[in-house]
Amino acid sequence: MPTHVLVPFDGSRLSEEALRYACAEFGSGTVTALYVVDQRTDATAAIGWGDHPGEWEEWLDDRRDHARELFADAGAIADASDVSLQTGVAVGPVAEMVVEAAEEYGADLLVVGTHGRSHLGEFLLGSVAESLVRRSPIPVTTIRGPVTDRE
């Protein structure tokens, strides 16, 4: 039985479902919600940094504030299962940061939400979930969302 579960958490419905599952199934251990700031995929990121001193730091502070807001929602999910939730923030490519955080926090299981996608009858994991399944040195449990068609 896992003793420390790490859940990548971005406030999406799928990350909420992954956190609910982790709390319900493994809440007697440690559960950590991790928010990853990735400037390559974050819609609030500037195309180029350096227009004025401190721009990057200001943006990171804004993203950390956003993470705290998300963690309030995550805390409510954990409270519903009577689980004490730990939180963390990492900066960098999502899959890479999740794997690094799992090692840093001593996690022994990842629980991640993924979109089910149908394309000519094939099921494909979301890109982050797929990368975690391939790269993670610890087991990964995926929580699948509804199947959608790719365009």
Image (cartoon, rainbow, N blue to C red):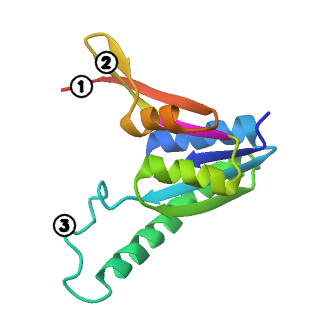
Q: Residue at x 56, y 55 (%)?
A: 34
The answer to which quarter of the image holds residue 101 is bottom right
Q: Amino acid at mark 2?
A: Ser
Q: Quadrant of the N terminus?
A: top right
Q: Mark 3: which secondary structure?
A: loop
Residue tagged by mark 1? 150
Residue in front for this viewpoint, 38 or 104? 104
Q: Residue at x 63, y 47 (%)?
A: 6
Circles 2, 1 touching at the beta carbon (< 8 Å) = yes
The magenta segment: 109-113
Q: Which mark is residue 47?
A: 3
Q: Amino acid at mark 3?
A: Ile
Is residue 41 visible in the rendered structure shown here?
Answer: yes
In screen coordinates, is 103 left or right of 61?
right
> Percent x, y for residue 144?
48, 27
**Rounded to the nearest whole Å, what is the CA distance between mark 2 and mark 1?**
7 Å
Circles 2, 3 touching at the beta carbon (< 8 Å) = no
First-in-chain label (2 vs 3): 3
> Percent x, y for residue 100?
56, 53
**Rounded to the nearest whole Å, what is the CA distance between mark 1 and mark 3?**
27 Å
- How many callouts does the rendering have? 3
Question: Alpha-carbon neighbours of circle 2 within 10 Å: few (<14), some, or many (≥20)?
Answer: some
Q: Mark 1: which secondary structure?
A: loop
Q: Quadrant of the C terminus?
A: top left
Is residue 76 visible in the rendered structure shown here?
Answer: no
Q: Which mark is residue 118?
A: 2
75 lies above or below 117? below
